[in-house]
Image (cartoon, rainbow, N blue to C red):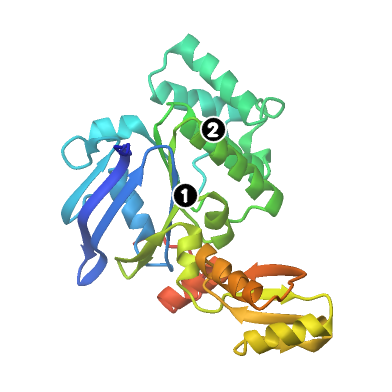
Amino acid sequence: MTTQQHRSAITTSGLRKSYGDHAVLDGLDLDVPEGTVFSLLGANGAGKTTTIKILSTLIKADSGTAAVDGHDVATDPDAVRAAIGVTGQFSAVDNLFTGEENMLLMADLNHLGRAKGRRRVAELLEQFDLVEESRKPAATYSGGMRRRLDLAMTLVGDPRVIFLDEPTTGLDPRSRRGVWKIVRELVARRVTIFLTTQYLEEADELADQIAVLDHGRLIAQGTSEDLKRRIPGGHVRLQFADVRELDLAANVLRHAVRRDEALSLQVPTDGSVQSLKGLLDRLDVHSVTVDGLTVHTPDLDDVFLALTGTAKGGTEEVSL
């Protein structure tokens, strides 16, 4: 039986970029499948924004190759620009224009024509719940509304690949979840999302694949669960109905941490299905009845700190 190969929306090979003696990207290799969310994590200055700038043709790499939607960013930049949308760290909304005027400007820049442009703008204003506010100046919009307008403007040209560079920075939790909903809807339509974020919960919620960048090098990549399993500290909490079952289990699992007041044992594990099955099989062989269990794994914050040795947060990455 043959396996179906994915179509790559973004690829890079040996991508390098330096500013003076400072290497910002040092041989970056990526392969992002079409119709997925790919999240690039890293401390400020790790090279995230530089990667997006190269992939969106804003700057050139010193060496290496990169392609977006099948087009080489160095030799066919016009085709790349026609295929992408970019929402940066800072809003591209013009405060003096109304929401609708901002959208119509983007329609003109995408050469949609008057009638088609107005239809597309009307569709997006409806989709992003901005119809009622569309005739008001953007300066009056809340942070969440401005970000929704910014995303809507990005979609006017119907891009196949969208770069979101820290899109929810400064938004309240409700507005952030509104952006997440939009991202999921886009991916359902086979749009590819390349996401950088300071909120590790955001990557955990949205990303099909997560890559960790440190000093311009890719140091880890995989699903959220794959990365969490690489970090020690995971455990299974076994709950028992009475002291007798707790005693039996403690005799079998001598390395576990016993908590008598809670009638529970804490057993180290990597969180995999195989290790969990092995643990339960071992208890079953000794006729130990488990009343309940909870699997605890490290979160992405733990992964980030363990891999980079750097606390997330700090100033925004702008120049690198």
- Residue under label 1, please give it: 208
The local secondary structure at tag 2 comes to helix
Q: Dividing the image into 4 quarters, which one contains the N terminus?
A: top left
In the rendered structure, the answer to whether residue 99 lies left or right of residue 190 reads: right
- Residue under label 2, please give it: 152
> Is residue 95 at all visible to an observer of this figure?
no
Q: Amino acid at mark 1?
A: Asp
The residue that appears at 29% across and 37% down in the rendered structure is 2
> Is residue 278 at all visible to an observer of this figure?
yes
Q: Quadrant of residue 184?
A: top right
* In contact (CB < 8 Å): disc 2 and disc 1: no
For the residue pair 2 and 175, the one nearer the viewer reads as 2
Question: Looking at the image, is 177 positioned above or below residue 228?
Answer: above
Q: Position of residue 150 (x, y in %)?
A: 54, 38
Q: Position of residue 317 (x, y in %)?
A: 42, 62
The local secondary structure at tag 1 comes to loop
Q: Amino acid at mark 2?
A: Ala
Q: Dividing the image into 4 quarters, which one contains the C terminus?
A: bottom left
Pair 2/1: label in front: 1
Question: Looking at the image, is 11 positioned above or below residue 49?
Answer: above
Neighbourhood count class around disc 1 (C-alpha, 10 Å): few under 14, some 14–19, many 20 upward: some
In the rendered structure, the answer to whether residue 63 lies left or right of residue 36 reads: left
The residue that appears at 29% across and 53% down in the rendered structure is 30
